[in-house]
Amino acid sequence: MFNWLDRLVTFIVEEIFHLSIESQLGGSIHFFFYDTIKILMLLFMMIFIISYIRSYFPPEKTKKLLSRFSGVGGNFLASLMGIVTPFCSCSSVPIFIGFVEGGVPLGMTFSFLITSPIVNEAAFAILLGLFGWKIALVYVITGVIIGTFGGMIIGKMKMEKYIDESVYEMQVGSLDEQKLSQRGRLSFALANVIDILKRIWLFLLIGIGIGAAIHGWVPADFLVKYAGPNNPFAVIIGVIAGIPLYSNALGTIPIADALIQKGVGIGTALSFMMAVTALSLPEIVLLKKVIKPKLIVTFVIITGIGIIITGYLFNLIGNFLI
């Protein structure tokens, strides 16, 4: 699909920069330009399509819809809703608060909170372009499963008492459903593309830059030794390493791509990405303002275990997906 782009970037690197793409610097420059252009193209297409669909589901309508469901079906629906909402954990937290304040069951709100930063249309677009439809689809499915069962477990534990009382007194506001024309929906989708790209471009370029550096300069033997598929603790190390960092999925996918190209297990790279997006320290700091430590610890443990299991599963079946 992008063979033409590979040829174009190779021509630029070799004929304009006079560098071999087999060299460290040439390989890094090729990786940076190729991934940047491809990812931006995919992002524009996918964000536009999903934003158009999202125009039919404003936040207030989503909250009302979720409040009608319960049980595992409600958790599953909340996870699906997380796919078409914010791109990072910190922007998911205000909607999480709105769900709690609006009476959505706690387990369902956590299903949303877990899935929302991990899985979204932009992440799917990049995964599709970098790894193919099999890995992209399995990633989405596992993200929804983690959110569904993670939220269901928290709901079964009856931890509502660990929500700060002030949350129930908040008025996060509501948004009346807009009756948009088709032209209005297309304008909304285009405006959303521009808004999202403005907010994430720096994360994206930093992630691609780090990925390019790893691709060109980090020895493959070093990464394989400590994070390769033969290291039984590689996935756990990847998850622990990801928690102190903060980015959205878009900024971490290029890093995961570079790690995989260097021989790191696909499950290790993707679990690192999930940990960065779903268990970041800034998110935990925000959550601490509205939920009590015991519930935060429970959320981190349950989500972390789900990510670790997913990482090992990807490492086992990764060769069949690539």
Image: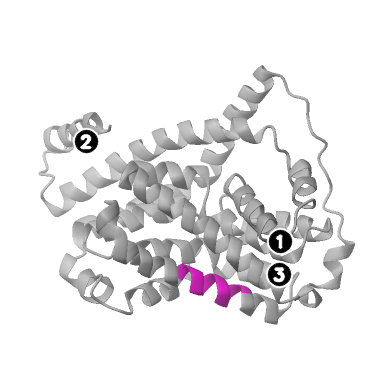
**Residue 22 position within the rendered picture, expressed as x and y whole percent measured from the top left:** 10, 49
Where residue 91 sits, quadrant-wise, is bottom right
**Is the Cβ of the residue at disc 2 closer than 8 Å to that at disc 3?**
no
Along the viewing direction, whichever of 35 and 154 lies nearer the viewer = 154
Q: Amino acid at mark 3?
A: Gly
The quarter in which the N terminus is drawn is top left
Which residue position is annotated with label 1?
Answer: 71
Q: Is residue 302 magenta?
A: yes
Image quadrant assignment for residue 240: bottom left
The amino acid at mark 2 is Asp
Residue 6's mark? 2
* Quarter of image, res 128: top left
- Magenta stretch, residue numbers: 299-307
Q: CA distance from mark 2 to mark 1?
A: 48 Å
At horizontal 39% and vertical 67% (from top left) the residue drawn is 311
How dense is the environment of label 1, judged by Cα within 10 Å: few (below 14), some, or many (20 and up)?
Answer: few
Task: Please say if 310 is above or below 92.
Answer: below
Task: Name which of mark 2 and mark 3 comes first in the sequence.
Answer: 2
Label drawn at residue 155: 3
Q: Which mark is residue 231?
A: none
Residue 193 placement (x, y as % from top left): 55, 34
